């Protein structure tokens, strides 16, 4: 892919800028689609229809209309807010979630950067999001915003530990942190996927990862940072127009990022489930996005099925359930690998 | 390597300016947020020195851990409990002695280290540093590694002890 682009444009810098922009070209239509999907999924779960008019067929153009409306909105900055930080926060949040896409392999031919530290880099760089959220909460000068940001940061920091540990279980089997390498090891039929290796320990690690990733992206049942019944809208209460859209985009980008990691690490990433059937670089994109979208659907499904947890239950799940089980998985897989 | 020089100077200027904000800002929250850019710039310099593992660890530990904890501390005390935190110079003499000592050490290290001035983009040379670091932790540097983990464990126990609810003497 890099060589091809360098040949076309004759300059490395142009080629790399294009490689860096490709995930953005994916994220924006994806986010529009996912917001529409979320509305339709929630509506059907509650025995409603959801948006039906805009665009004709099942209201498919509803989110496009929404984003045009958001673009026209007045940008309101509260008088008592800290203007500089209030302006900067949405961008830091989005940079943090977009930077993770640099190491996500969309296909055997396309990955933003051939990082040897792939997974480790993604875990590290997503901590920028936490700083951005704290910045948004503090600068809004609003108690709801601040409480939302505090809850969100506490939650993400705690759940980073089970996330990292459950990914470590696979890294131990693969012997590399490079996501492209991890994907190559899972080629062939679906029983070569890491989720089925060292059964059932990697499967447990996968469940731990999935639960922890729900908390990392503030999705129900762990959406207490934006619990609308207590906190209005959490850290983005005071944001309007495009800045609010930025938070929304970052949230949906994050949802895809965690789903993409789940599919790349545990479910074979861009590999076709059926050996050589429908495999190749282009089909790779299809399989990768399909697996990612499946997890997004599961996230929506859970959101409209489960009630919200309390703060203490949240911390209990992270520290007393997920973390010990993740350690147990690592221990068991380590012994299995030694034998 | 014109481009690499440009990138280096960009991050160097970013580090110096943000570190200046950290030190001179009257608002302690600005200081804490400016640290984000300092840490990020230092991580970028590590990347330019081809220390990829160190760069990512820098982000994970300093931005994800230490900075978030500092922000927590500052915000909880500053906004929620409204304690006045003042940012002004205190105890100038001992502070300048310690600063001079640290500066002397750093300048000493800076002048004696053999710096990599040219980034060599040979694919064979840019191999992953993770396994080398892991092996040396488990062989040559096993003792320091274990001692560091014991220190961290002690810190954890200490934090738990401090945060624990104290037993009241006269039970109600």
Image (cartoon, coloured by chain):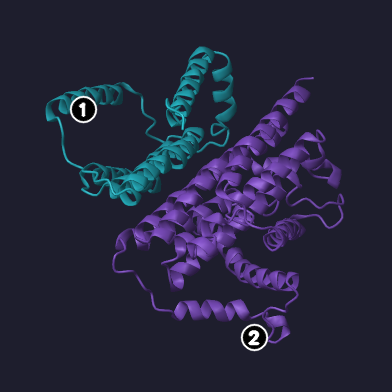
| Total count of labels | 2
- Read off the chain for label 2: A
Are labels 2 and 1 on one chain? no
Is the residue A303 above or below the residue B89 in the image? below
Letter of the chain shown purple in the rendering = A
Q: Residues within 10 Å of mark 1 (few under 14, many from 20)?
A: few
Position of residue B114 in the picture relative to residue A94 (left or right) = left
* Residue positioned most to the left: B93
Say what secondary structure mark 1 lies in. Answer: helix
* Residue A117 seen in the figure: no
Residue B67 on image: x %, y %: 40, 41
Say what secondary structure mark 2 lies in. Answer: loop
Residue A233 on image: x %, y %: 49, 64
The answer to which of A148 and A131 lies nearer the viewer is A148
Contact check, label 2 and label 1, Cβ < 8 Å: no
How far is mark 2 from mark 1, CA to CA?
65 Å
Residue A54 on image: x %, y %: 64, 85
Is the residue A226 above or below the residue A175 in the image? below
Residue linked to disc 1: B99
Q: Chain B's colour? A: cyan
Q: Residue at x 16, y 28 (%)?
A: B96
Is the residue A203 above or below the residue A109 in the image? above
Residue linked to disc 2: A54
């Amino acid at each position: 892919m890099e060589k091809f682009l360098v040949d076309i444009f004759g300059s490395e810098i142009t080629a790399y800028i294009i490689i860096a922009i490709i995930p953005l070209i994916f994220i924006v239509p994806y986010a529009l689609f996912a917001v529409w999907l979320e509305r339709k999924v929630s509506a059907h779960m509650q025995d409603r229809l959801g948006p039906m008019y805009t665009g004709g067929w099942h209201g498919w153009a509803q989110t496009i209309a929404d984003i045009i409306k958001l673009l026209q909105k007045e940008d309101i900055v509260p008088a008592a807010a800290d203007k500089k930080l209030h302006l900067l926060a949405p961008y830091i949040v989005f940079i943090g979630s977009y930077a993770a896409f640099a190491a996500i392999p969309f296909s055997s031919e396309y990955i933003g950067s051939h990082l040897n530290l792939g997974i480790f880099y993604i875990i590290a760089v997503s901590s920028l999001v936490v700083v951005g959220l704290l910045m948004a909460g503090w600068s809004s000068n609003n108690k709801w915003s601040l409480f939302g940001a505090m809850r969100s940061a506490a939650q993400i920091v705690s759940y980073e530990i089970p996330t990292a540990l459950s990914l470590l279980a696979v890294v131990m089997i693969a012997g590399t942190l490079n996501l492209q390498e991890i994907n190559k090891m899972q080629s062939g039929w679906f029983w070569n996927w890491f989720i089925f290796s060292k059964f059932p320990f990697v499967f447990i690690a996968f469940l731990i990862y999935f639960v922890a990733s729900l908390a990392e992206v503030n999705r129900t049942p762990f959406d207490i940072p934006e619990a609308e019944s207590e906190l209005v809208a959490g850290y983005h209460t005071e944001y309007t127009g495009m800045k609010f859209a930025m938070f929304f985009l970052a949230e949906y980008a994050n949802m895809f990022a965690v789903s993409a990691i789940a599919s790349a690490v545990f479910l074979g990433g861009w590999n076709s489930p059926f050996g050589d059937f429908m495999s190749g670089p282009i089909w790779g994109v299809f399989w990768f996005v399909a697996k990612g979208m499946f997890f997004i659907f599961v996230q929506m499904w859970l959101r409209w099925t489960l009630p919200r947890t309390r703060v203490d239950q949240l911390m209990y799940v992270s520290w007393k359930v997920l973390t010990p089980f993740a350690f147990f998985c690592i221990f068991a897989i380590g012994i299995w690998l030694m034998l | 390597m014109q481009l690499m020089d440009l990138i280096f100077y960009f991050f160097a200027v970013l580090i110096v300016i943000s570190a200046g904000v950290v030190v001179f800002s009257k608002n302690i929250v600005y200081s804490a947020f400016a640290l984000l850019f300092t840490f990020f710039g230092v991580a970028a310099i590590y990347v330019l020195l081809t220390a990829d593992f160190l760069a990512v660890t820098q982000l994970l530990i300093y931005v994800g851990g230490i900075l978030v904890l500092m922000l927590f501390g500052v915000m909880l005390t500053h906004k929620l409990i409204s304690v006045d935190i003042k940012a002004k110079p205190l105890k100038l003499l001992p502070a300048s002695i310690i600063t001079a000592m640290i500066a002397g050490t750093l300048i000493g290290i800076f002048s004696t280290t053999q710096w990599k001035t040219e980034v060599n983009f040979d694919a064979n040379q840019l191999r992953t540093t993770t396994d080398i670091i892991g092996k040396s932790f488990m062989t040559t540097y096993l003792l320091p590694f274990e001692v560091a983990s014991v220190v961290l464990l002690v810190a954890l126990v200490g934090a738990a002890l401090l945060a624990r609810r104290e037993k009241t003497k006269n039970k109600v």
